[in-house]
Image (spheres, helix red, strand yellow):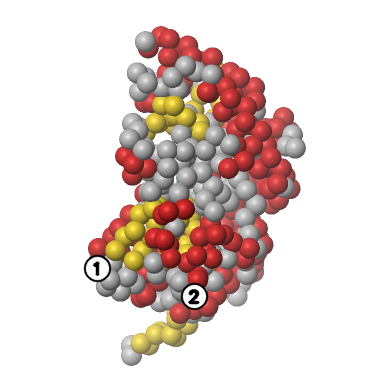
């Protein structure tokens, strides 16, 4: 179990007051807060080691390169991949687009199908919509049930597709999709599968070899890391046959007027000066999570989810979306209260120090499919407590009373 009292001491921002109230930060689905260990790792990099990587033989450049590549090894180990299969991007959106622009552009042709689902974040939906249009391919969008799950009747969309892109855990419904099963289906039919793990890697143990996915994307800032750093995992044999994404320095080993020879993976996909401080910060975030143990991170979340689900459902008329079983979902709880707009609710809650989200959460299609209005969302992480939930619920009730 996590010792939240100790954990909270590592997060300077949690000492803040908002409108005179202690901050209760429940917008972790959007971004997580950062522990002092991550902040210090970035300060240390700039104070003591800053230089450009892979380019110089001087001491600082060698140190910076070593730290950068060490971070890649940590990321690889964290998801059970090989270091050369880890590409650093600026966020998950860029990682997802990278696959669309390189693999998609090279291997999707007119008449092919691309499968995705209606519960995707816009970053995991729009690249495929654009690619399908460009290639005259078909976009097969798997629907969801009222309970927020993809019904088996939709799985044939994976079987018929050359490429499937699917979110591991929905940022609206919390649903954890059976991506291992989806990968099996995709491979039986010679397709490839890309998993968007932006909402799973921060919260669950993830093993890309066990899932057997071909590509896996996630983002550092939702898992205690800094902004501006994301990750794309790709199977070595696929990355090797894909063209580069961006062109420039670092991704080339021989540049001649007649033509160029691309660098080896993963550098082939990392044009230009990378975000060194960001990768080092992400490495420190992984150290922090490893110290806690991802099994414990998940157990804490399930406990908070059980507690909050029960309490939220006691609010009369409240509609909670996604699976009700906390073991089937991650720590995002999205809801609406009839007669109370989610934007009003979150701005009133802010007056009492609660940071909660409202709107479409960059996932408008799933709102439309389920016929729901922009929604309110609370999302947990390692520093949240049952006491915070116990403080939240009466305030929601109070706001609702005041507004009706
Ligand atoms: C499921 C999912 N995919 C992708 C993203 C995009 O992440 P980023 O904005 O870091 O690129 C998010 C962010 O909210 C997300 O929740």
Instruction: Mark yes or no: residue 207 visible.
Output: yes
Mark 1 crowd level (few <14, some 14–19, many ≥20, 10 Å Cα): some
Q: Residue furthest front?
A: 153
Place of residue 365 in the rendered image (x, y in percent of width and height, measured from the top left)? 33, 44
- What residue do we see at 37% from left, 42% from top? 366
183 or 102: which is nearer to us? 183
Is label 2 or label 1 in front? 1
Place of residue 241 in the rendered image (x, y in percent of width and height, measured from the top left)? 45, 79
- Asked whether the residues under the numbered discs 2 and 1 touch, taking CB atoms below 8 Å apart as contact, a structural biologist would say no
Q: Quadrant of residue 260?
A: bottom left
Place of residue 32 in the rendered image (x, y in percent of width and height, measured from the top left)? 55, 40
Q: Is residue 242 left or right of residue 71?
A: left
- What residue do we see at 50% from left, 71% from top? 188
Q: Residue furthest bottom?
A: 258
- What residue do we see at 33% from left, 35% from top? 371
**Distance from mark 2 CB to nearest ligand 1 atom below 8 Å:** no
228 or 42: which is nearer to us? 228
Could you say whether the residue bearing mark 2 is in a helix, strand or loop? helix
Instruction: Mark yes or no: residue 16 visible.
Output: no
- Mark drawn on residue 103: none
- Mark drawn on residue 136: 1
**Which residue lies under the disc numbered 2?**
238
* The C terminus, quarter of image: top left
- What residue do we see at 53% from left, 19% from top? 314
Q: Is residue 27 above or below residue 97?
A: above
68 or 327: which is nearer to us? 327
Place of residue 212 in the rendered image (x, y in percent of width and height, measured from the top left)? 58, 66
Mark 2 to mark 1 CA distance (whole Å)? 23 Å
């Amino acid at each position: 179990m996590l010792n939240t009292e100790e954990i909270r001491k590592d997060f300077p921002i949690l000492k803040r007051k908002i409108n005179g109230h202690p901050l209760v930060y429940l917008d972790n689905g959007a971004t997580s807060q950062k522990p002092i260990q991550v902040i210090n790792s970035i300060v240390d990099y700039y104070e003591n080691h800053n230089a450009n990587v892979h380019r110089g033989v001087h001491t600082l450049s060698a140190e910076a390169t070593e730290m950068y590549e060490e971070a890649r090894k940590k990321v690889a180990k964290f998801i059970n991949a090989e270091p050369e299969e880890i590409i650093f991007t600026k966020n998950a959106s860029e990682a997802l687009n990278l696959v669309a622009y390189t693999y998609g552009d090279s291997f999707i042709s007119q008449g092919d199908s691309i499968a995705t689902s209606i519960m995707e974040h816009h970053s995991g939906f729009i690249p495929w919509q654009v690619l399908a249009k460009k290639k005259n391919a078909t976009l097969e969008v798997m629907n969801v049930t009222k309970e927020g799950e993809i019904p088996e009747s939709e799985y044939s969309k994976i079987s018929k597709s050359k490429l499937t892109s699917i979110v591991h855990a929905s940022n609206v419904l919390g649903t954890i999709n059976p991506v291992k099963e989806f990968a099996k289906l995709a491979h039986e039919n010679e397709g490839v599968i890309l998993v968007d793990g932006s909402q799973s890697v921060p919260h669950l143990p993830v093993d890309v070899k066990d899932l057997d996915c071909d590509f896996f994307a996630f983002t550092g800032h939702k898992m205690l890391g800094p902004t501006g750093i994301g990750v794309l995992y790709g199977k070595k044999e696929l990355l090797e046959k894909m063209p580069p994404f961006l062109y420039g320095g670092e991704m080339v080993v021989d540049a001649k007027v007649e033509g160029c020879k691309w660098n080896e993976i993963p550098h082939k996909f990392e044009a230009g000066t990378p975000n060194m401080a960001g990768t080092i910060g992400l490495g420190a975030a992984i150290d922090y999570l490893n110290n806690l143990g991802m099994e414990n991170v998940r157990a804490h979340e399930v406990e908070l989810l059980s507690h909050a689900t029960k309490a939220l459902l006691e609010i009369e008329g409240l509609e909670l979306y996604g699976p009700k079983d906390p073991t089937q979902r991650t720590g995002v709880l999205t809801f609406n209260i009839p007669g109370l707009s989610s934007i009003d609710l979150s701005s009133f809650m802010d007056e009492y120090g609660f940071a909660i989200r409202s709107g479409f959460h960059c996932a408008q299609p799933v709102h439309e499919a389920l016929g729901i209005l922009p929604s309110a969302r609370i999302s947990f992480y390692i520093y949240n407590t049952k006491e915070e939930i116990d403080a939240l619920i009466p305030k929601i009730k109070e706001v609702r009373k005041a507004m009706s």
